[in-house]
Image (cartoon, grey):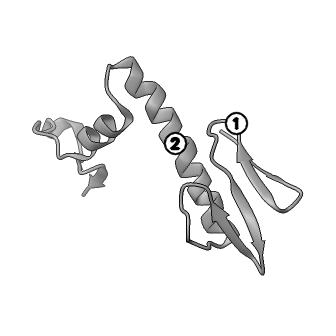
């Protein structure tokens, strides 16, 4: 995954068709977030998120699910308890202490 900035005014990626464009005064707009002006750090994070979604889509295809189905199912709490010998438990996508 690689977000690239071209000419200090356009952000592209080799993983997604989405783009971010500079609108001046340090502001950036991202193709899938119309109407929002972001900082360059936020625009970069948004582009990285779009890349991650593209990867999830490829993996979802491999298990016969849509990207949205995969994300929705993955963020639900697991019905299985981890064995106490495994240490910490996973809960809602975050490591629970």
Q: Is residue 80 above or below residue 4?
A: above
- Image coordinates of residue 92 in percent, x first then y, are 24, 51
Element assignment for label 1: loop
Q: Residue at x 75, y 77 (%)?
A: 26
Does the CB distance between marks 2 and 1 fall below 8 Å?
Answer: no
Q: Is residue 90 above or below residue 46?
A: above
Mark number, residue 14:
1
The quadrant in which residue 8 appears is bottom right
Q: Is residue 31 above or below residue 85?
A: below
- N-terminal-most mark, 2 or 1: 1
Q: Residue at x 22, y 37 (%)?
A: 86
Residue 23 in sight here: yes
Q: Residue at x 17, y 46 (%)?
A: 77
Q: Residues within 10 Å of mark 1 (few under 14, many from 20)?
A: few
Can you say which quadrant of the picture contains the N terminus? top right
The quadrant in which residue 64 appears is top left
Mark number, residue 26:
none
Q: Residue at x 28, y 40 (%)?
A: 74
Q: Is residue 79 above or below residue 97?
A: above
The quadrant in which residue 78 appears is top left
Q: CA distance from mark 2 to mark 1?
A: 12 Å
Residue 3 in sight here: no
Mark number, residue 52:
2
Q: Residues within 10 Å of mark 2 (few under 14, many from 20)?
A: some
Q: Residue 94 or 13: which is nearer the viewer?
A: 13
């Amino acid at each position: 995954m690689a977000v690239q900035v071209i000419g200090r005014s356009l952000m592209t990626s080799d993983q997604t068709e989405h783009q971010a464009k500079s609108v001046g005064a340090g502001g950036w707009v991202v193709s899938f977030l119309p109407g929002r002006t972001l900082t360059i750090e936020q625009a970069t994070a948004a582009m990285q998120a779009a890349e991650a979604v593209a990867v999830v889509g490829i993996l979802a295809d491999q298990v016969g699910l849509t990207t949205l189905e995969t994300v929705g199912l993955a963020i639900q709490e697991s019905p299985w308890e981890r064995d106490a010998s495994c240490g910490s438990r996973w809960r809602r996508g975050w490591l629970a202490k």
